[in-house]
Image: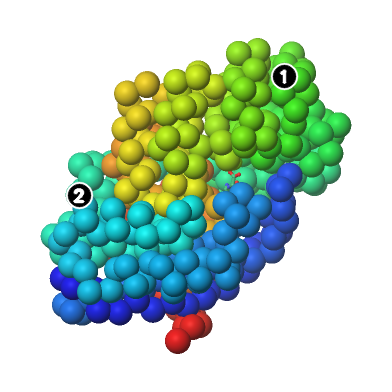
């Protein structure tokens, strides 16, 4: 199965409500689509969101990395030489993990089609259903309480509550949300790097003292501050999950060796796709550190690839794949079925995507 052409396009999908974190606020998904065509007629699909605030990858940078490096490296190669192809993809440019992730998942899609197996089965997985949380954007406490009630009414039983924008309000935010939902859902929180290490310990222990029952906190301190993360992990009653601190498998090993976090968040857009995500999962197995699978604000093409990984790896025990349910429409034909919190993986070959509506091709 030889790669003959790689086409790029864009999709736009409005969100149901604006998505707000301590790092950014957005109202639609505007993602780059990658289509890898082959001499058998098989097509592999990938998607890359420009999450500049986290990955540094803008739309222009994603397109540039693909056009100037990745496409030239991949066209003419045989998908069956999979390890060679993956090494070439990862070696052709440093960083640019979102562009690499889009190409990586399109290649896995093709590899599964070549051997007529869904990717999660190719990886040895057997679970076909997973349950995601849903994100509550950071706003004033009353609005967050209303959003939490709406999420419960949609059937969610785990909320990922964003905090950190004006941290003085964070305890009040969590009190309002917990009061509104009672014990109808678990609450995990994500500070998206907003707190200092000491502030984090103080706020988390206040939340614990007030009986808010926080499952874990995601990325309380700056991404580069591994020592600060360790400081919080050692002193907080609330378990700590490393998100923006872990891009590469090397980051993951360092965090685990240091004991800087209790849990690690794997995201395809941070690590460059399934090939590297599998290395993080293996390291986590060795260290006995459970993982969350997360996403950026993404539509279903790329989140679908993360679903396959989650269905394959038992070390992934927490699911934050709510990108598609935050969107007001789904342009993707085939792939996983998202029925609010319940996600059912596709059993079609590869990643199971049959097409994408409304692509604006760049060529
Ligand atoms: C969408 C997901 N639940 C989420 O919160 N992901 C990120 C932020 C994504 C973004 O800004 O696009 C996270 O920090 O976990
Ligand atoms: Mg996060």
The quadrant of the picture occupied by the N terminus is: bottom left
The correct choice, above or below, for 259 with respect to 346 in the image is above
| Residue density around tag 2, few if under 14, some if 14–19, many if 20 or more, within 10 Å | some
Checking the image for residue 355, the label placed there is none
Look at the numbered disc 2 and say if its residue's Cβ is closer than 8 Å to ligand 1.
no
Identify which residue is drawn at 62% across, 35% down. 224
**What is the number of the mark on residue 122?**
2
Residue 353, percent from left and from top: 33, 67
- 142 vs 352, nearest the viewer: 352
Q: If the picture is divided into quarters, which one holds ligand 2?
A: top right
Q: Is residue 325 above or below residue 60?
A: above
Give the position of the C terminus as an image quadrant.
Answer: bottom left
Residue named by callout 1: 201
Residue at point 78%, 23% (across, down):
199
Q: Is residue 180 visible?
A: no
Percent coordinates x, y for residue 20 in the rendering: 72, 51
Residue drawn at 33 percent across, 64 percent down: 106
Q: Secondary structure at mark 1?
A: helix
Total numbered badges shown on the rendered structure: 2
Q: Is 354 drawn above or below residue 262 in the view shown?
A: below
Q: Is 99 on the left or on the right of 124, as rendered?
A: right
Q: In which image quadrant can residue 57 be found?
A: bottom right
């Amino acid at each position: 199965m030889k790669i003959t052409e790689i086409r790029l396009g864009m999709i736009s999908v409005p969100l149901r409500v604006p998505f707000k974190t301590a790092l950014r606020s957005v109202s639609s998904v505007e993602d780059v689509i990658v289509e890898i065509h082959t001499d058998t007629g098989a097509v592999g699909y990938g998607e890359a969101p420009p999450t500049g605030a986290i990955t540094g990858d803008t739309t222009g940078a994603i397109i540039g990395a693909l056009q100037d490096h990745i496409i030239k490296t991949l066209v003419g190669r045989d998908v069956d030489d999979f390890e060679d192809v993956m090494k070439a993809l990862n070696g052709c440019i440093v960083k640019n993990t979102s562009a690499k992730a889009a190409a990586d998942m399109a290649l896995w899609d093709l590899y599964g089609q070549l051997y007529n197996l869904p990717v999660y089965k190719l990886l040895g997985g057997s679970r076909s259903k997973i349950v995601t949380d849903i994100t509550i954007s950071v706003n004033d406490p009353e609005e967050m309480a209303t959003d939490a009630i709406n999420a419960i009414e949609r059937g969610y039983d785990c909320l990922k509550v964003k905090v950190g924008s004006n941290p003085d309000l964070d305890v009040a935010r969590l009190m309002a949300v917990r009061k509104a939902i009672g014990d109808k859902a678990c609450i995990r929180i994500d500070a998206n790097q907003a707190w200092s290490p000491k502030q984090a310990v103080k706020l988390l222990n206040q939340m614990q003292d007030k009986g808010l029952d926080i499952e874990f906190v995601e990325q309380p301190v700056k991404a580069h501050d591994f020592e600060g993360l360790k400081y919080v992990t050692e002193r907080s009653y609330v378990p700590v999950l490393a998100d923006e601190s872990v891009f590469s498998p090397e980051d993951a090993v360092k965090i685990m060796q240091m004991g800087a976090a209790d849990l690690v968040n794997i995201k395809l857009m941070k690590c460059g796709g399934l090939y590297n995500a599998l290395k993080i999962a293996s390291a986590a197995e060795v260290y006995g550190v459970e993982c969350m699978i997360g996403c950026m604000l993404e539509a279903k093409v790329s989140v679908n690839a993360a679903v396959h990984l989650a269905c394959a790896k038992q070390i992934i025990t927490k699911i934050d794949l709510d990108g598609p349910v935050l969107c007001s429409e789904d342009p993707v034909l085939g792939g996983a079925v998202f029925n609010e919190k319940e996600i059912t993986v596709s059993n079609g070959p590869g990643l199971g995507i049959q097409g994408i509506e409304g692509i604006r091709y760049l060529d």
